[in-house]
């Protein structure tokens, strides 16, 4: 029987399926962070249950860690308690833990793939919605809640149900100056933030095949913003080339056997999806969000929409509220919106390729950040990314342009550490969510690609990066 990629991985990990469809799913890799795991560990202690398979777990401190002055420790008491608790829980249960002082520390969704803790065909869960990132490697990966974290720690299984399947085929050729982030925002704009609710999305088509692994991770990372349970991309040479030399990847004959199996991790030619969508991206322009949801997005040459043009009363009300929160007027050109801060980083766009794309804009254009830009942050997604970027001299490009070059962590992606917006501040952000208060209470977030964020830093407002420099490509 023909199967989709999702069905192949799900079915091969199903321990038992009841008549009502409830499935006990085996989990290959459990990723942990300091925010969502403490309650699960505490409950295990209370019930005197051990962690069933410690080596299948990997913990990384990322949400609450400071990105500067780490020698002074964590100032915020709640953040410090959570980070300390993660370390102690991992020591007590013999779980691999990469804390602030570790050379492998970073954002868990950057660290796991670069170490080979994420491999094709795996089932992967984490107490973080952007676990969908790992689907770029042909894995079934999704976020779970605290009670589910406890269940996985205790049994290495998860009680779940099968998702519906959706294929999004991206056709054409990605225009110069556009990236995987622009693709992701365009897809979310097409589907809406609830358009993929209950689905696992498989991204397919020539545009997806042409993406680097870093670009594919960006695309799968943002699939959750369309409401999807997971995002997946079939295994191909790009996948295998990325995995081949990773620290935790198999070696020798074991690699040969694994690679042979992994090449079958694609949907069968005659597999049927519950829903199909396609998008020709040949005329795509760099994207910018204007509102308080990733679906509130338009091209850089567009304008803020007028709520009165909306026929649907619910959408009209949400657009009106978004404009009030964002302090924007209907029909304002996107290129007329000035910014206060710039953030380049996150599990969406904190990889080497992202930093290189931004640095290329800064290096080619020359000059420094605009006077009205109060702060510009460049935050590597991991210590490995930081080392590689510095070996290429990228940190000097950012610093010369007026950016602050920081230590790895989630940073300004969310207001759980010292990097945050003040009320009323507006940011060009490469992160994944522009919800009210996401990057700081009263802060106003606009999602863009790394190249677009760099261009905005120089101009002090949103501007088409293609007008500043002759962009030569990249994701």
Image (tube, helix red, strand yellow):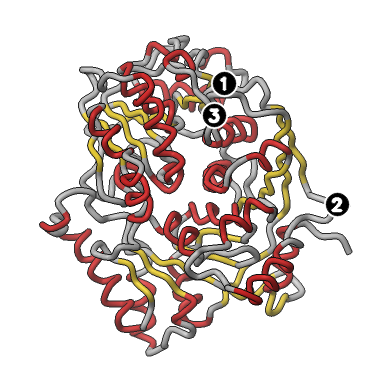
Q: Position of residue 41 (x, y in %)?
A: 36, 77
The disc, 1 or 2, on the residue closer to the chain's N-terminal end is: 2
Q: CA distance from mark 1 to mark 2?
A: 31 Å
The residue carrying pointer 1 sits among few (fewer than 14), some (14 to 19) or many (20 or more) residues within 10 Å by Cα, namely many
Q: Nearer the viewer, residue 365 or 232?
A: 365
Residue under the image location 34 percent in, 71 percent down: 97
The residue carrying pointer 2 sits among few (fewer than 14), some (14 to 19) or many (20 or more) residues within 10 Å by Cα, namely few
Q: Position of residue 6 (x, y in %)?
A: 71, 59
Determine the secondary structure under disc 1.
Answer: loop
* Mark identifier at residue 269: 2
Residue under the image location 22 percent in, 33 percent down: 422
> Is the residue 40 above or below the residue 246 in the image?
below
Determine the secondary structure under disc 3.
Answer: loop
The disc, 2 or 3, on the residue closer to the chain's N-terminal end is: 2
Determine contact: label 1, label 3, CB under 8 Å.
no
Q: Position of residue 86 (x, y in %)?
A: 30, 70
Q: Which residue is mark 3?
A: 473
* Mark identifier at residue 72: none
Q: Position of residue 167 (x, y in %)?
A: 73, 45
**Which is closer to the viewer, label 2 or label 3?**
3
* Mark identifier at residue 285: 1
Please indicate, yes or no, whether residue 306 appears anywhere in the rendered image.
no
């Amino acid at each position: 029987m023909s199967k989709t990629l999702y069905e192949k991985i799900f079915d091969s990990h199903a321990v038992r399926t009841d008549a009502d469809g409830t499935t006990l799913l085996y989990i290959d890799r459990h990723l942990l962070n300091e925010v969502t795991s403490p309650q699960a560990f505490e409950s295990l202690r209370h019930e005197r249950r051990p962690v069933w398979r410690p080596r299948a777990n990997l913990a990384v401190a990322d949400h609450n860690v400071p990105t500067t002055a780490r020698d002074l420790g964590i100032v915020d008491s709640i953040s410090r308690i959570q980070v300390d608790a993660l370390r102690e829980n991992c020591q007590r249960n013999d779980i691999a833990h990469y804390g602030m002082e570790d050379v492998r520390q970073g954002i868990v969704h950057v660290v796991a793939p670069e170490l080979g803790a994420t491999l094709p065909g795996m089932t992967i869960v984490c107490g973080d919605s952007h676990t969908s990132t790992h689907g770029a490697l042909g894995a079934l990966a999704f976020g779970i809640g605290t009670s589910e974290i406890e269940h996985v720690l205790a049994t290495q299984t998860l009680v779940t149900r099968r998702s519906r399947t959706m294929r999004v085929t991206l056709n054409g050729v990605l225009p110069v100056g556009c990236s995987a982030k622009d693709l992701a925002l365009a897809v979310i704009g097409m589907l809406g933030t609830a358009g993929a609710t209950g689905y696992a999305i498989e991204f397919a088509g020539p545009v997806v095949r042409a993406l680097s692994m870093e670009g594919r991770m960006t695309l799968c990372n943002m699939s959750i913003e369309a409401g999807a349970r997971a995002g997946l991309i079939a295994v191909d040479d790009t996948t295998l080339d990325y995995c081949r030399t990773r620290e935790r990847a198999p070696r020798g004959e074991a690699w040969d056997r694994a690679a042979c199996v992994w090449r079958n991790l694609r949907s069968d030619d005659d597999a049927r999806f519950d829903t199909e969508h396609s998008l020709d991206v040949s005329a795509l322009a760099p994207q910018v969000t204007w509102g308080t949801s990733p679906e509130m997005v338009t091209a850089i040459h567009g304008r803020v929409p007028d709520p009165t043009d909306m026929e649907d009363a619910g959408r009209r009300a949400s657009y009106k509220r978004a404009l009030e929160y964002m302090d924007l007027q209907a029909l304002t050109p996107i290129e007329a919106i000035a910014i206060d801060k710039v953030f380049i980083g996150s599990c969406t766009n904190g990889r080497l390729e992202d930093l290189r794309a931004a640095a290329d804009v800064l290096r080619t254009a020359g000059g420094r950040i605009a006077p009205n830009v109060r702060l510009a942050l460049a935050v590597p997604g991991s210590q490995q990314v930081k080392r590689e970027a510095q070996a290429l001299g990228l940190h000097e490009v950012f610093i010369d342009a007026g950016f602050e070059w920081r230590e790895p962590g989630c940073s300004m992606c969310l207001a759980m550490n010292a990097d945050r917006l003040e009320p009323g501040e507006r940011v060009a952000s490469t992160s994944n969510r522009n919800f009210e208060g996401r990057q700081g209470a009263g802060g106003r977030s606009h999602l863009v690609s790394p190249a677009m964020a760099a261009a905005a830093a120089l101009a002090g407002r949103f501007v088409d990066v293609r007008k500043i420099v002759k962009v030569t490509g990249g994701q």
